[in-house]
Structures are given as C-alpha cells and as structure tokens.
Image: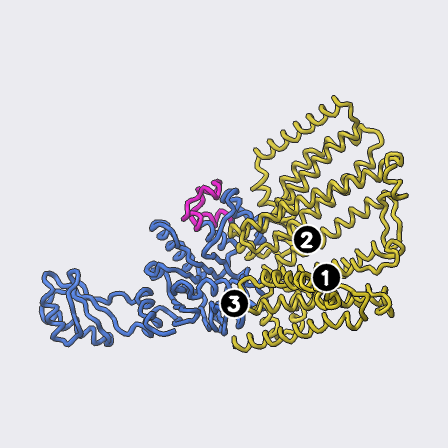
Chain colours: A blue, B yellow
Amino acid sequence: MKDEIVRTTALRREYGEVVAVRDMDLSVPRGAVMALVGPNGAGKSTLLKMLSAVLEPTRGTAVVNGVDINDNPRGVHSAVGFLPDFFGLYEEITVSEYLEFFARAYGVPRGRRGNVITRTLTDVDLLEKAGARVRALSRGMRQRLAIGRTLLHEPPLLLLDEPASGLDPESRHDLQKLFTRLSRAGKTLIVSSHILTELEDYCTHVAILREGTLVACGSLAEVSASIVKKRRVRVKAAGSQDGALALLRAAGLKSPAVAGGSVFFDFSGGEEELAGILKRLLDGGVKVVHFGEEGGGIQDTYLASLEKKP
Amino acid sequence: MSLLTDVFPEIYRYRAQDAGRVRLISGLAAALALCGATGYSIGRTGGSWRDYLSAITYMQFNMLVFYGTLCAAKSITQEKADRTWDFQRLTPLSSFEITAGKFLGAPVYAWFLFACLLPAAVLALLLGPGIAADFFNRYALGLSIALLSMAVGLLASAYDDTGGSGMGYLSGPLVGLAGITALNASFRYADTLTQPASALYRYAAARPEPGVLEFYGLRLSPDWCVVFAAVSCLVFAAWAFLGAKCRVGGDLLERRRAWRLPAFLVFLALYIAGFEYGPARGGTPPLTSLLLPVLAACMAAFLSGERREYWRRWLEGENPARRLDDTPSWIKGAAAVSAIAAVLYLTCGLGELGAKPFTRLYFILPLFLLRDLMFLQWCRFSAARRPEMMALACLALAYALPAIILGPTGMHRALSAFLPYAQAEIGAGANLAGPLAQVLLMGYVLSRKIRTVLTEEV
C-alpha cells in the first residue's frame, strides 16, 4: 500500500518466556498522528523500539517508510526520529553543542548545519537556551531538546514513547502545540502516552494494545464505532432540568438522570433518532442550551476497549 | 581537526565535554610545574638527562595508560548507564565511526596532558648525549602499550551489559592497572637491552643473551626486539579495537561476519606458535598455541549473549549467506579451535598419538571445549535468569569435583575422563574415550533440549 508509512506483519518479540508483542499486524497511514495506548506492559515501548530498528523482532517483520527492519535496520534509522521513554542527554555540553554533535552524526553538511540547528531550536522553543549547559535545563526543556534531536535529520516518521511523562501542565501544553505543528508539517507521528485526554487534541488514529496484542486500530471514528456501543448524551436546559427529564423518560430512553445541573442518558440509536429526541424536547417547551454527546474520544474508547477481550 | 571531527563526531563531543578552557589551562600549568619540579629535583641530586627523560616518560606514559584507559573503558559503559546509547545507535554513524570516535575522543584530555609533557622529553633528547635509543624505545613501547590498553578498555566497555553498575566501571581500573604493569615491565625490559653488558652481569650469568626474543626460530637483535614488542602490541590493539567495533556493530544491528572470530583465533595460535617454534621449545609440542585460542573461544562464547531468541532466528533464517554470518559464536569458536588443533597435530604430532602422550591434548582440549560450550548453550535454553553464570558455576564444579573426589580415593585412572590432561599410563583410546563420550552425551541432551523448547514455543 503506497500511502502506508508503517506496516507490520506477524511482528513478535519475546523476552525469554515473556511475549511482549504477539504476532502483530498494524498499519499506519502516512501523515497520521497515531495514539498508541494500553496499560503498562502492553508492548507499546517494545513495538516502538522494533519500528525504530533498535530492537530485533523475534519473528515477523515491519516495513517502515518502504524499508524492511530486518533487511536494512540502518536504512530505517534515517527515516525515523525515535524518542524512547527513558533517555539521557549529555549533561556537560551546551544545548547548541548537543545539537551540533547530532547534526554532525546525521551528516548535515557544514554549510547548512548552523541553519538546521537554529531552525530546530526555534521549533522546540529553545533558542534562548542555546548557550546553556544541558544539565541546567528543566525537565520540559530537556524533553523538547530530545525531540529537537529527533527532528534534526527531518525524518518523515516520529516515534515518541511517553513524551509527556512527568511534565507539568504548561510543558505538556507546549508539547501539544509542537506535535500539532509537526502534524501540520506533514510528519507522521506515533505517540504512546498514558495521558489520553491530551492525545485527543491532535491524534487522528488510535491503536489499542493489551498484553502484546492489538485490540483495535484505525481512525478515531472507526475504532470508537467498533468499540463504543453506547453513547452518553448530555442535555442542559435553562432553569430546572425536571421538564427535560420528564420528556426524556416519556420518550422511553433508558435511565435518564440529573447530574451536575444537566440530564444524562445512554443512547445506542442513529443520528436521525437523536435529532428526533432534540426536536421532541424543543417541541415540549424545554429551553435547550446544550445537547451533545459526551466523551467518544480516545479515553472513552480505551476504557470501553478494556471490556473487550484481547 | 575539523575534518576529523566531521568524520568522527564523537571527538567533537568529547572535546566540548572534557577539554574546556579551564581544564586545559589547569592541565598545562600542572604539567609545567611537574616538569620543573622533576628537573630541579634531578639537578639537585646530580642526575643526568637520561634520568630526567626516564622520570618524565615514566610519569607521561603511566598517566596516559591509566587515565586514557579509564576514559576509554567508561565510554560505552557511561552511555548505557546514562541512557544516551540509543540516541547514538539511531544516527547513521557506522560501528567503525562510533568506535573510532570513542577510541580517539574519550581519552582526549589524557592525550592533551601527554602532549604537555612531551616538550620536556624532547628537550632531554636534544640536550642529553646518547639517549636517542632510550627515547625511541620508551616512546615506541609506551605508545603501543597505551593504544593496546585503551583498546582493551574500550573492548571491555563495549561488552559491558551491566547497565552502568559498579562491575561495569571496575573494568577500567583493572585494565588500566594491567596496562601500567605491562608498561613498566616493558620499560625495564627496554632498559636491559640498552644497558652495557657489564651492567647485565647478573643476568648474563644466567643467560648468555638476556632478553633477546626468538620468533619462528629467528633470533631478533635488541633493537628489533623493541620494534617487535611494539608492533605486537599494535596488532593486538587492532584486534581489540575490531572486537569492540564488532560488539558495537551488534548493537547497531549491523551484519555480522562469520570469519572474524576464527580469524582472531588462528592469528592467536600462529602468534603464540612463533615463540614455541624450533629450538626454543626443545621438542615440546606447541600446546600454548592451542590453549590460548581455547580460552579466547570460551570467552567469546560466554560474552556473546546469544540466547534462545538468537538461536531461533538463526535456525529460521531464510537467507543461507546470512545464516553463515550469524553462526553462533560458540560454534564458530569450537570449529576454529578444532581446525587449529588438527593443523598443529599434523605439523607437530602426526603418527605419534600413542608414542607422545602430549599430542593427545590436540584432541582432548577441543573435546572439552565443545562439551563446555554445549553445556553453556543448554543453560541458555533453560529457564535460568543468568545462564552464563549458571554455566560458569557448574563447569567450575565439573572440573573441581573429580579432582577432589577421585584424587584421594586413588582412582587416578578415571581422572582423565573428567579433566583435560594426557595420561601417559593409559592408551590413547582410553584417554580420549571419556571426553568423547561426554561430548556425545552433551550433544544429545542439547539437541533434545532445543527441540523441546522450540516445539513448546511454537
């Protein structure tokens, strides 16, 4: 498939007796931002390491940007920017020296090196810290510097393992903005994270892993539709909610209930049916100020997937 | 320098990290103070320029060997401990570029201090009469041993999988100590070669030509002895560097080459055989040239870390050319040692298997090696968390227990079945039967184990 940047075929990795990734078939379209979610030990980090060709699979293979990870792992390295979950930086050099070292390692020509480093520092918002020692950076800055390193050779695919782990809300917000920018610039991102609500803002696709197995994979809407069978709808009326509650009960909906100044009900019908309910409320004289689905994002999809057997 | 740092970016990083202005100025000041104090001290005690050269080179090379080795030996260990190694692995740098960068870059400050002391040694050469030979000998031996010691330090660092624990950091001081021991021994050796015959009286009484080397029957002159020793160190340094490069290449998932380990073992056998050849060995078969490759093959197998996953990938490999290159180290090592033993037997012991019991060792040693390496692989297929440690412990018992049990009970005849030695009182067949039976038994047990484990996993 031409538009796939990653395709794995029966990819498997074992650590002794433990199967970390179990015969996984996964595909990621070019330009997607994929959230890789799953509990600890689901195989996310192992999968990312295999996709970045720093870890050999026990069996199976993956093609990354047209290069087979078994046949040409070094070819894969030039196509990916990988940020592991735990990493270190060279503490005793400055930020610009750090990037200069990796620019040399990636073979950036001498004439372009200065521009590439300045552009990268701008991208990750560290231009003012160019002369600072790495050891003096805050955690968020270190994370951004490490991401800057992954961008130096302009890879089409970024593999980021828990990039927001341990960051304060402001740093996480900065990171989100950076990912959104990268996504707009046409990069494919595969991001593993536990902070699911934040992934919703920029992810287009989701892959749910459990015990080394792929539970679901696809666009957010596809996966959500395949897993989340019931939708939760919130109705907020001006003033008292009693009128809305009575009308919803009369419509035969299951267990509508008032919570936090709104009425919630579970719904498993189609869009037309939902529109009919809204019309009924309006016709019944309820002054509706909010009528919409709650959740349905990655977090709800993931939580719903926990009920599904791998 | 710029071109060098472009080719080996590691040098750039180490320079930025370890050679800041403050460190350079303080190092230079310390070197100047040291040279001045040494000169003053030697001048006051009536010493010669030769003594000054001796003192300066002693400090210069001991510092270079020990500190340079420490730096080289912690280079990869530190990267793994600090979790920066994965970032390096992801760059397009080849294993050669990374290894050479570390080899040249990690001891950059040691080389700077070395350079600071160099003018004092050159001054002694220019002003001291007749010390050119001393100067040449010390620098040839000192530099070659420094490179060897650093290369071995780098090799130890490349094989360190302890994740930066104390054991990982211990290899640097140990290799450094071995390096300075070899360095000072070589300096003493070089001194004996350049001193007048009268000064060597006590050695001369024991040996008419003290310290002169013979290699494949060729008697080397004192000057060539130094050249030979220096070249030998450089060649072994190159092998150690290649070993480190191969290990780094493994981390980079680079393609392996089947010939590398056997080539080293053959080189080792040929090199050692040179000293055992001809009149020097006095009719004794060159067994050390088999023994050292056996030890090297053992070390390579234990350090390879080729566990169950590796074995299965190798068995299931679809490309025959790659399968040959990926042959597990213990098989390559055992095969190479067997070939070396066969060649040594054909050249030194043909037709005398029964007549000269020593020549049986050409069969006995490879058989014991094969048994031990098959047992190591069996441990790797067991559920042991540290199969190499388990194998080492069991093998130590396998060699110690027969001696402890059979020795006092007077069952000496049975000892040769469990220990690798030639027993003159029994025939060759009886001497070989024990190890051969163990090899066959171990081979059967291992093949069953592999089959069972792989079947279970499927």
Q: Is residue A72 magenta?
A: no
Q: Which residues are magenta?
A: A117-143
Task: Give the side of residue B180 with respect to residue A279, left or right.
Answer: right
Is B427 above or below relative to B221? below
Q: Which mark is residue A16?
A: 3
Q: Up-down: is B8 above or below B395?
A: above
Q: Looking at the image, can residue B266 be seen?
A: yes
Residue B336 seen in the figure: no
Say which residue label 1 marks.
B294
Q: Are marks 3 and 1 on the same chain?
A: no
In the rendered image, residues at marks 1 and 2 fall on the same chain: yes
Inspect the image, locate mark 2, and give the three-letter code of the amino acid beneath it.
Phe
Q: Dot 3 falls on which chain?
A: A
Q: CA distance from mark 1 to mark 2?
A: 21 Å
**Disc 3, SS:** loop
The residue sitting at 79% across, 56% down in the picture is B272
Residue at numbered disc 2: B241
Q: Residue B276's spot in the image, x, y percent?
A: 83, 56
Q: Quadrant of the N terminus of chain B?
A: top right
Count the numbered circles shown.
3
Q: Earlier in the sequence, mark 1 or mark 2?
A: 2
Residue type pointed to by label 1: Val
Foreground label between 3 and 2: 3
**x and y, in percent, of residue B129 in the image:** 84, 29
Q: Residues within 10 Å of mark 3 (few under 14, many from 20)?
A: some
User: How far is disc 3 from disc 1 in space, using C-alphas?
Assistant: 29 Å
Q: Residues within 10 Å of mark 1 (few under 14, many from 20)?
A: many
